[in-house]
Image (spheres, helix red, strand yellow):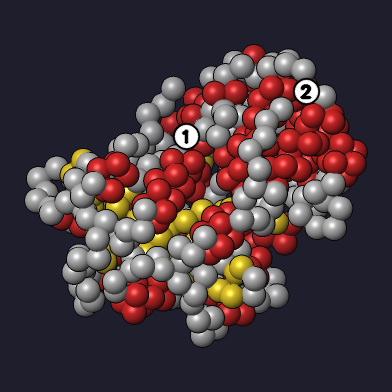
Amino acid sequence: MTSWPRFPVRPHGRSWIFFTVGAVVALLTGAAGLLYPASSYTPLSSKCEHSELFVVGGTDISLNYERRRLISQWNKEHRHATLVEVSDSTDLQHSQIKAMEESGGCAYDVLIMDNTWTAQFAESGYLRPLDDPEDPEDFFPNALRTGRWHGDLYAVPFNVDVGLLYRRTDMPTKTEQPDSWARLIDSPVIMQLADYEGLTVNALERVWNSGGADFMGEGGRGEKYLRENVYQALEEFATRVKPDLEARKYHERESIDAFASNSQKARSSTARLMRNWPYAFSTLAAEPQMQKDGGLRFEVSALPGRTVLGGQNLAVAKRSPHAADAERLVKFLTEVKNQKELFACGGLAPARYSALGLRPGEKVPENWPIAKCSELDKSMTGLDETHVLDHEQLQELGRAIVTALPGASPRPVTAHYSTFSRTFRGCVVKMINNKPVGERTFARAVRRSLNGQTASC
């Protein structure tokens, strides 16, 4: 298995603090978790006494730590901001941020959240309402809608995620590109099947592409709908993925490694396809074994059929002592210039059309003028070119993202999403492990979870 690539960045001194899984306990008691090496930093307090901004989110997986670099740019002219990287696990990020906000603490100012959290955090009173962006039409519509709850805007999309299809092009036998989700699932494709949010995403895409789309609409919560439109699709999904013993351990990282090394076992021993997010492109492109004769050993395109619209949103904590500056930081991070750099320098899909050189509704031009990183930021000139994407690669990735967006939908929008996700994927895990899950038991558990009640199969 290949190593997980981490790329060189300029040091940022005291700007970055990292917390382990139990760091929230330290935060709530006013004691620090783990500090960045050679850093001297006063421990975070849950009280409203800090003079700088604290931005909390997951581990920065962007190429060249672009997310950190943008905050470093902000620090040159504004109130100092410190990035707190909680975990690379979405589930752990959610639980730790939720614990801090539930405690009534003021440790965080800006939240980098999974876009499914908006409803829960807004409903719970953790977020401050925001004014609409000055140019809302420039944001991808479905992405901007994930920041709304009961008509008010509580979060602005920072970067979007859509499911993409990666295909190895260097194998002796050519792999045809599946033209439907049914053919994709019958192919030796690498997916994310470990018991975490990734399994929820992959299972939802199976359900959606079988016609069971509307979990939250009229009748969607009903047990009859869940039995007839969701259960059967998941039974078929479980049957398909049961033999993939290794893939049942995979998060995004492990699936990327397996695709790069082509070492997946079971029926996927010759896996040449992978379902993953946009950031996987730059991660793979930087791997020496994925480069060949100045090109790449893989290509990327939109997934066939419907896909989950993922991504991170930016929100301001309700009890932030520096709300005005926090809102200015949110605006800064979503400015067109910085969104362009997030894509070209960081490999993350931006949230705005103009960051890709497009206007709403405009088709991708034949000669797509997407600037590469060094053309946007002269400080990146001279960076090892294996650590950035060139024009052709940015165009390929951008085209896949833009093609996938019309078929991308948010996960169920509910203030009880985390309860739903745990229940839903728990049922899927049992199906995969050949444990009996009756259709009525499944439908009752999922219905209860959508209403915020603890349930299981």
Near mark 2 (Cα within 10 A), the count class, few <14, some 14-19 or many ≥20, is some
Q: Is residue 85 visible?
A: yes
Image check: 98 left or right of 407? Answer: left
Image check: 224 left or right of 414? Answer: right
Q: Which mark is residue 253?
A: 1
Q: Quadrant of residue 7?
A: top left
Q: Quadrant of the N terminus?
A: top left
Q: Position of residue 103 (x, y in %)?
A: 36, 53
In the foreground, 80 or 71:
80
Would you name the residue on which mark 2 appears? 437
* Label 2 element class: loop
Label located before the other in sequence (2 or 1): 1
In the foreground, 234 or 454:
454
For badge 1, the amino acid type reads: Arg
Q: Quadrant of the C terminus?
A: top right
Image check: 385 left or right of 79? Answer: right
Name the front one of labels 2 and 1.
2
Task: In the rendered view, tell whether residue 190 sits above or below residue 154.
Answer: above
For badge 2, the amino acid type reads: Val
Q: Position of residue 208 (x, y in %)?
A: 78, 46
* Label 1 element class: helix
Q: Residue at x 42, y 54 (%)?
A: 102
C-alpha gap between disc 2 and disc 1: 30 Å
Q: Residue at x 78, y 32 (%)?
A: 442
Outermost residue to the bottom: 134
Task: In the rendered view, tell whether residue 395 sits above or below residue 285.
Answer: below
Q: Position of residue 50 (x, y in %)?
A: 20, 65
Q: Position of residue 49 (x, y in %)?
A: 20, 66
Image check: 169 left or right of 3? Answer: right
Q: Residue at x 25, y 65 (%)?
A: 48
Q: Is residue 182 visible?
A: no
